[in-house]
Amino acid sequence: MRSEIRSVLIVDDDADIRAYLADLVINLGARPLQASDGAAAVEAVRGVLPDLILMDVEMPNMDGLTACRTLKSNPDTQRIPIIMITSLGALNDRVSGIEAGADDFLTKPVQVPEFNARVKSLLRIKKLNDSLESAENVIFTLANAIEAKDRYTQGHTQRVTAYALELGKATGSSESELLSLRHGGSLHDIGKIAVPDAILNKPGKLTPEEFQLMSQHTVVGFNICAPMKSLAHALPCIRSHHEKPNGTGYPDGLKGVEIPRVALIIAVADVFDALTSKRAYKEAIGHDRAHGILAEEAYRGALDAELVKCFTRTVMPGFHAAAGSG
């Protein structure tokens, strides 16, 4: 269990300033950590993730803005709040700090009441974010546990995520779309928690009643994740990855442009992995045959035709080569 004592990383090339700020941090009941420049700060967080970073702007080796930008671009450290410490009247530093991802600012010389208020506020926010992250971890752990229910689909979500990300990159997806694909791919089948094992592992064709129950996993998954605002970007993938451009999919019967693009990408990845993996009701097929089936599905409007073309042209060859070299 994580200690309730919060840690604050103080980054400044002036040892006296670091010592002064460290005393203020101790007075707030937190534990001070120190780094002498931006490069040392980036290295320090690889070992111990602080709850807050106080970052001077002007430093040798790596300045504070560069260090801030580096930390905020890393998924492992982007949630650590950073307070940039700027000189009085340094408006350009503040504008650059905002662009680099800074969460707040303090002006030199630091005033104790303002320091206390800003540090306590961001430490409180960080504590809330930690709780949120813990809840997210529970959701992703649940998704992995559900996959284990079906002995034939272990590794399915990881493969779907990998295929979807490659297809997203190949088709020019934005960073936000790639994040949707990363989390949506991992969580797209989480709703199968509501599907009995006997149906998941059934060796034969599902009855209409069984298929109806299986198809509800999209809505169940959506309802599980919808309360988590931090997972809002994944919801289109979770709910709509079985929708089809011709309108015959589920759960909402969406058609054409009504279907979120990220869901269409997940759909192609999902079908490809289902074809090339052994399941209770079928054997795995080779990439060449899978290529043909994907083309057939695109022709009849069950998959997005342009995405299938891109997938078979750019994504499949890379994964086929990697599998052959393994």
Image: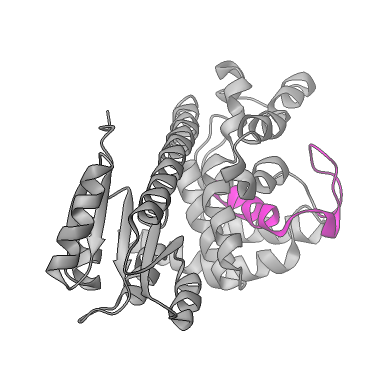
Image quadrant occupied by the N terminus: top left
- Residue 90 x/y as whole percent: 43, 81
- At 81% from the left edge and 56% from the top edge, which residue is drawn? 301
- At 27% from the left edge and 51% from the top edge, which residue is drawn? 8
Q: Is residue 286 above or below residue 65?
A: above
Image quadrant occupied by the C terminus: bottom left
Q: Is residue 78 above or below residue 86?
A: above
Scheme by which the image is coloured: one colour
**221 sits left or right of 212 in the view:** left
Task: Identify which residue, 204 or 188, lies in the foreground.
Answer: 188
Q: Is residue 322 above or below residue 272?
A: below
- Residue 306 x/y as whole percent: 72, 69
Q: Is residue 254 magenta?
A: yes
**43 sits left or right of 254 in the view:** left
Task: Identify which residue, 73 or 288, lies in the foreground.
Answer: 73
Confirm whether residue 152 shows in the render.
no
Which quadrant of the structure image shows residue 318?
bottom left
How many numbered callouts?
0
- Residue 116 x/y as whole percent: 36, 49
Q: Is residue 265 magenta?
A: yes
**288 sits left or right of 65 in the view:** right
Confirm whether residue 187 shows in the render.
yes
Task: Identify which residue, 109 or 233, lies in the foreground.
Answer: 109
Task: Identify which residue, 304 or 257, lies in the foreground.
Answer: 257
- Residue 192 x/y as whole percent: 60, 27
Which quadrant of the structure image shows residue 10?
bottom left
- Magenta span: 245-273
Residue at the left extreme of this rendering: 15
